Image (cartoon, helix red, strand yellow):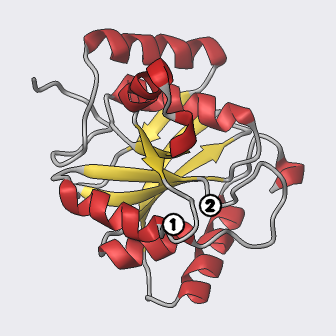
Amino acid sequence: MKYDNPHMSEHSPRMGNGVTRWFGSVGLKLIGWELVGRMPDVPKFVIVGVPHTSNWDAVSASLAMLASGFKYTFLVKKEWFFWSAGSILQALGAYPVDRSKGENVVRQLVRLFESEDRICIGFPPEGTRSKVERYKSGYLRTAYAAGVPVFICAFDGPNKKVTLDRLFPLVGDLQTDNDALKAYVDANYTGVRPERQ
């Protein structure tokens, strides 16, 4: 079913319905946040949620995605997929990753990208809400291996905005791209908890 949405592009992965979009919109208003910007017009990409400094990042991002009808996949350890919890997590967009010895997570994610026509996999590249000097590189290794771009979803703490920013230009060198993305985020966005950025 088609619907007009200024935040979605033609090829955006989609989920939900009018009820879930209403719930996301009301939730965003209640916490005082706003969704701005537009998803890229590509069917497959990695999305990074930055700067990740507070639990409010995840709350606002989840409500923003519900409000827009955008579907993103997030990673959860396969051990969490037990009994009814697995069905609930899957409905929310979770994907079970096997972190056991010998299982390569990037290889699992490449297979996931290959199996879907439209998919976006989300990463908080800090890997923590604490201050870090450098992002973890899993999001880049996944993007390189799958041959997909990286899109920035930024949390503008002072203005309470979830900002759909841009596809970030990559040169193909892990350290260069990782450093450049963090420098861009630090220069343009302030998180909910600036002291953790």
- Could you tell whether 118 is left or right of 57 in the image? left
For residue 185, above or below residue 171: above
Tell me, for residue 139, which label it has, or none.
Answer: 1
Q: In the picture provided, is 130 more to the left or to the right than 40?
A: right
Query: What is the number of the mark on residue 125?
Result: 2
Q: Residues within 10 Å of mark 1 (few under 14, many from 20)?
A: many
> Pointers 2 and 1 in contact (CB under 8 A)?
yes
Q: Is residue 77 among what the camera can see? A: no
Q: SS for tag 2? A: loop
From this view, report whether residue 62 is shown above or below residue 157. Answer: above
Find numbered disc 1 in the image and state the secondary structure of the residue it sits on.
helix
Question: Which quadrant is the N terminus positioned in?
Answer: top left
Q: Is residue 102 left or right of residue 3?
A: right
The span from disc 2 to disc 1 (Cα, nearest Å) is 7 Å
**Residue 79 picture location, percent across and down:** 56, 40
Q: Which residue of the protein is positioned furthest toward the left in this rendering?
A: 1
